[in-house]
Amino acid sequence: MIQYEQTQYFFLLLLIPALALGYVLFTFWKKRVQQSLASSAMLAHIVPDRSIFKGWAKQVLLWVGLAFICLALVNPQIGTELETVKREGVDLVFAIDVSKSMLAEDIAPNRLEKAKRLASELINQLVSDRVGIIAYASSAIPHLPITTDYAAARMFLNSLDTNMISSQGTAISAAMRLAETFFDDANQSNRVLCVISDGEDHGEDALTAARQAASMGITIFTVVVGSEKGSVIPIKQGTNVTYKKDAEGEVVITKTDVEQMRAIADETEGLFLEGSNTSEVITAIIDRLKAMDKQEFEAKQFVKFKDQFQWFLGIGLFLIVLELFLFYRKTQWLKKLNLFHDA
């Protein structure tokens, strides 16, 4: 299996035919000038040992040498080595609240966008951990199974919105119960659920679900986005903005529930964090993940591509040096054989 690391250098090979064409034109011009100054017989008498063949041989060596150097810049790579890679890390599942209350703008730009930004920045700091995503409101749905593909995780994270779950409300317990099915190795002790929400919960068994998660070895980190003072929930339709109202027609004020989020984290000896300062949240979570026991969860064998540029570079330099030491004079023993009829 062959691949090329720097394919843009293939364009340099176009210089070789350009040099060849230039040399051919120069040769015809030089011959025409020489014929205007002296006859062929006189030129043969003036420079009897000059070899026409060696002139062309020198140019061919130069062109081929330059071609090999261009190929060295391209750096052909051959996959011949098998390398075993063992990955150790933590399984981290994000449970992102996508209820309508996450549209409140008491934290910029709004609670949901802040939650997505926190999760994205955290993924950027991971190295060999696996990640998954759960979206929840009144119910929970699997949004991304556990994977090591961080690019896919960021893409699925960006696609989260408040229209994913039609029935509204917030049931953190549903997200915790769904998370129990995400971890595919019962022997793992490094399973983390990161709940990012404003903390509003319309269910009644969040702490019960947290205790159940703790019994299964799941550590829960809770991150609160929003303010305890609360905010209205904007409903935007084009340029029109209205605010969510309750059954009595009163504008709904959504407030964070810090105490419940703290209690959920405490049930699993996890972390409780306020999400207003992104860098502080990321640092706290990463430090905690680093302190956890790492377990090998993946071992792969794959083809490792070895650089081969040195062979092309060596051949190219050898041909160019050989060209420098090849003189225009005829070789005496070849002259006697007269193989090329180079009189």
Image (tube, rainbow, N blue to C red):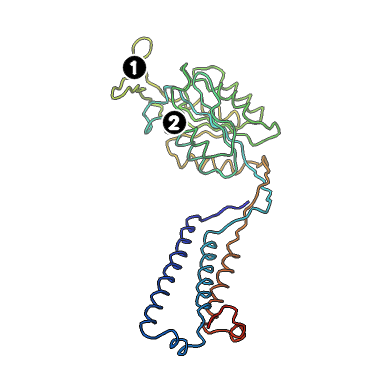
- Residue 91, given in percent of the width and then of the height, sits at 61, 36
Q: Secondary structure at mark 1?
A: loop
Going from N to C along the chain, the mark reached first, 2 or 1, is 2
**As drawn, is 64 to the left or to the right of 35?**
right
C-alpha separation, residue under disc 2 versus residue under disc 1: 21 Å
Q: How many numbered discs?
A: 2
Residue under pointer 2: 225
Q: Nearer the viewer, residue 240 or 243?
A: 240
Looking at the image, which residue sits at the far right?
Answer: 187
Q: Nearer the viewer, residue 66 or 140?
A: 66
Asked whether the residues under the numbered discs 2 and 1 touch, taking CB atoms below 8 Å apart as contact, a structural biologist would say no
The answer to whether residue 42 of the structure is visible from this angle is yes
- Residue 180, given in percent of the width and then of the height, sits at 62, 26
Q: Residue at x 53, y 67 (%)?
A: 64
**Amino acid, disc 2:** Val
Q: Residue 251: which numbered mark, if any?
A: 1
Q: Nearer the viewer, residue 237 or 35?
A: 35
Residue 149 picture quarter: top right
Q: Residue 330: which numbered mark, if any?
A: none
Q: Secondary structure at mark 2?
A: loop
**As drawn, is 266 to the left or to the right of 81?**
left
- Residue 315, given in percent of the width and then of the height, sits at 59, 69
The answer to whether residue 263 of the structure is visible from this angle is no
**Amino acid, disc 1:** Val
Above/below status of 37 relative to 280: below
- Residue 94, given in percent of the width and then of the height, sits at 54, 32
Crowding at label 1, few (<14), some or many (≥20) Cα neighbours within 10 Å? some
Looking at the image, which residue sits at the far bottom?
Answer: 46
Crowding at label 2, few (<14), some or many (≥20) Cα neighbours within 10 Å? many
Above/below status of 161 relative to 296: above
Looking at the image, which residue sits at the far left?
Answer: 239
